[in-house]
Image (tube, rainbow, N blue to C red):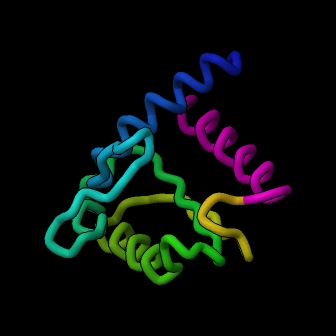
Amino acid sequence: MSPGRLMKSLLAVYALLVPLLGLSITGGRAAPVIDRDGSNILAAGNLRGALRIMHGTSDINASLSSTMRMTDALIQADKHFELLIMPGQPHSPEGQAQRYYNDDVRMFFLRTLQE
């Protein structure tokens, strides 16, 4: 798959996942849609398809406990997902961790788009 085609596929999958997880796209970034508890946990049962979650343990935008609550909701809803914990990384990985994360995302989409 060419890099251009891969990027188009990644963007298409992203656009499909955003509403399924109770998110909206604002300014090109996914932002939570406010619901009863202000989280995506209520939407966990709506997930369709593959999901990969990454969390940097030094993230100041989203706590690790919120990621754990989301993963618990997915488990309770019997939804399968993959989780990557990146020790010491902020909301967006930096340095070698960013390269690792980018490679991990590419491998995830190549693996799941071929299924």
**Where does the image place residue 66, in percent across and percent down from the top left?**
43, 77
Q: Residue 35 occupies which quadrant of the picture?
A: bottom left
Residue at the outermost right position: 96
The front one of 47 and 94 is 94
Q: Against 114, is 29 above or below?
A: below
**Where does the image place residue 88, in percent across and percent down from the top left?**
73, 76
**Is 44 placed left or right of 14 in the picture?**
left
Q: Residue 2 occupies which quadrant of the picture?
A: top right
**Is 12 placed left or right of 100 in the picture?**
left
Q: Residue at x 70, y 21 (%)?
A: 3
Q: Residue at x 30, y 47 (%)?
A: 24
Q: Residue at x 50, y 71 (%)?
A: 61
Residue 103 forms part of the magenta stretch: yes
**Where does the image place residue 33, in percent across and percent down from the top left?**
25, 57
Q: Against 108, is 87 above or below?
A: below
The front one of 27 and 13 is 27
**Where does the image place residue 115, in percent across and percent down from the top left?**
53, 33
Type of secondary structure dominating the magenta stretch: helix
Residue at the outermost bottom position: 65
**Is 33 placed left or right of 7 in the picture?**
left
Which range of residues does the magenta coloring cover? 94-114
Q: Against 85, is 114 above or below?
A: above
Give the position of the N terminus as an image quadrant. top right
**Is 92 placed left or right of 94 in the picture?**
left
